[in-house]
Amino acid sequence: MVLLSIPYSFPSFNNYISQRQSQSRSQSQSQRRYVKIGIQCGIAEPSGEPAPLGQKTKYNDGLFEKAFMTLFARKMENFGANKKESDQKKKGFFDYDYDSFVDVSRKVMQGRSRLQQQQVVRQVLMSMLPPGAPAQFRKMFPPTQWAAEFNAAITVPFFFWLVGPSEVVEVEVDGVKQKSGVHIKKCRYLENSGCVGMCVNMCKIPTQDFFTNEFGLPLTMNPNFEDMSCEMIYGQVPPPFEEDPVSKQPCYANICTIANPSSIVCPKLSAN
């Protein structure tokens, strides 16, 4: 899901962007230095790393993380299957946690097709942006290598609450190697939902579509359902859904609460 647009509306941030773009133009490719960015704070595991596959990672969520969970959960509750019930039982601002956020996402899936689920996420994201934000983003971040690398760098801290720890990595886009990839070590959303359909319909496809079509900066996300990691590649145009390997992904039969073990492909990935 998209969080990067939130700071873009502040004048100081815009001034920083302008200065950074001017500096970037004056630097040759050989002169640039990149820092490998990784954030481990917030994980309650003794190792500071996500728990091994099959175990649920423990996090210490602070006010910042809970604020984002509440913001998204409350927006999504408007589209939940039992809106009247959610209105009656609406929680306090800091009463939401990650489990309740995931639960709201699951309710949004109920009774909706793949495309309808993705449309809900788009509406939620649009409702969180100030007027004219997509046009402002396109102006500040035209689809260049610098824009792709910059967004990869700020994805690491701003997406931590949603997906867990990640790091910037080198990827190849159209034959050019660049630091516009983000490796998510073990996606918190996939780990807690345990649902292929939620990963694809509520995160991967809407986020790809939002960056590519609304912001004008191509983004491809490649979840690995074997180890629950994920790779985000800024600057790479995503393939059509029918050509994407995720379109043929089966359910997590042993951990998904709404799985259909007899189905070859996750039912939530069908168009209906």
Image (cartoon, grey):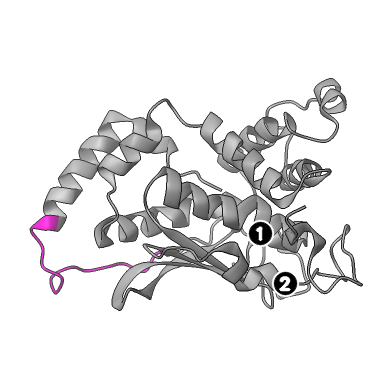
Residue 164 is drawn in which quadrant? bottom right
Whether 3 is drawn above or below 249: the answer is: above
Whether 260 is drawn above or below 160: the answer is: below
Left or right? Give the position of 258 relative to 200: right
Q: Is residue 28 magenta?
A: yes
Amino acid at dot 2: Gln
Q: Secondary structure at mark 2?
A: loop
Residue 59 is drawn in which quadrant? bottom right
Question: Image point 92% across, 72% down: which residue?
Answer: 262
Whether 103 is drawn above or below 252: the answer is: above
Q: Main secondary structure of the magenta part?
A: loop
Spatial CA distance of label 1 from label 2 is 10 Å
Residue 168 x %, y % = 41, 67
Residue range highlighted in magenta: 25-37
What residue would you read off at disc 2? 249
Residue 185 x %, y % = 57, 70
Question: Image point 44% across, 54% down: which residue?
Answer: 155
Left or right? Give the position of 215 relative to 105: left
What residue would you read off at disc 1? 200
Whether 125 is drawn above or below 194: the answer is: above
Query: How many residues crowd mark 1 within 10 Å: few (<14), some (14–19), many (20+)?
Result: many
Q: Is residue 252 magenta?
A: no
